[in-house]
Amino acid sequence: MSKPIERRQFLGASLATGAVATAAGLGLIKPQLAFADNVAGWPEKAFDAKLLKEAMSDSVGKTDIPVSSKVKLTAPTIAENGGAVPVTIEVDSPMTAEDYIAAVYLFVDHNPTPLASQFTFTPAVGKAYIQQRIKMAKTDNVRVVAKTNKGVLMASAPREVKVTIGGCGG
């Protein structure tokens, strides 16, 4: 006989399902993008790439992308826990139907899989802003590439994040 679901598990699952349904209903996310399985356009090859150049080529089509002050990447100089490095990405864009950020890619240069994440946007989001925690295998550069709906690519300057061994801070 299976164990009955606990109240907290039920409430958590219900809230998560409701949040995704609400966001999809408001047009903030496309329902097929909320669940990454078998999504057309999902850069599976880019996420499987082992080298930065391959990951960039497979996701955005090139490796030489101009740095723009419109792409802001915030990350700590020193991260004591490489398993949860806080990163904030903000891209200055009007986010109108005619001009908006369509996708943002986050890379960690020498991670086992350099493409750490990809986000897609619609104008309905209102702002290209992301906060997340990423895994970093070691001290490395983190960089962001943003792509507009017109195909224009722009990048942040690489940001070095020093990952301490054992979380001891030294």
Image (cartoon, rainbow, N blue to C red):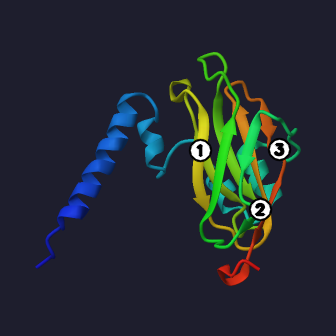
Instruction: Tell me the quadrant of the picture where the N terminus can be found.
Output: bottom left
User: Residue 62: which numbered mark, if any?
Assistant: 3
Q: Could you tell whether 60 is left or right of 16 in the image?
A: right
What residue occupies the far top of the structure in this picture?
98
What residue occupies the far left of the structure in this picture?
1
Expressed as whole percent of the image width and height from the top left, the position of residue 75 reads 71, 55
How crowded is the residue under tag 1: few (<14 C-alpha within 10 Å), some, or many (20+)? few
Decide: marks 3, 2 in contact (CB < 8 A)? no
Under circle 1, the secondary element is strand
Height in image: 71 above or below 8? above
Expressed as whole percent of the image width and height from the top left, the position of residue 126 reads 55, 26
Q: In front: mark 3 or mark 1?
A: 1
Height in image: 129 above or below 16? above
The residue pinned by badge 2 equals 77
User: Residue 149: which numbered mark, if any?
Assistant: none
Of label 3 and label 1, which has the lower sequence position? 3
User: Residue 130: which numbered mark, if any?
Assistant: 1
Q: CA distance from mark 2 to mark 1?
A: 19 Å
Three-letter code, disc 3: Lys
Three-letter code, disc 2: Thr
Q: Residue at 35% across / 30% down in the picture?
A: 25
Q: Residue at 69% across / 51% down in the picture?
A: 106
Instruction: Tell me the quadrant of the picture where the C terminus can be found.
Output: bottom right
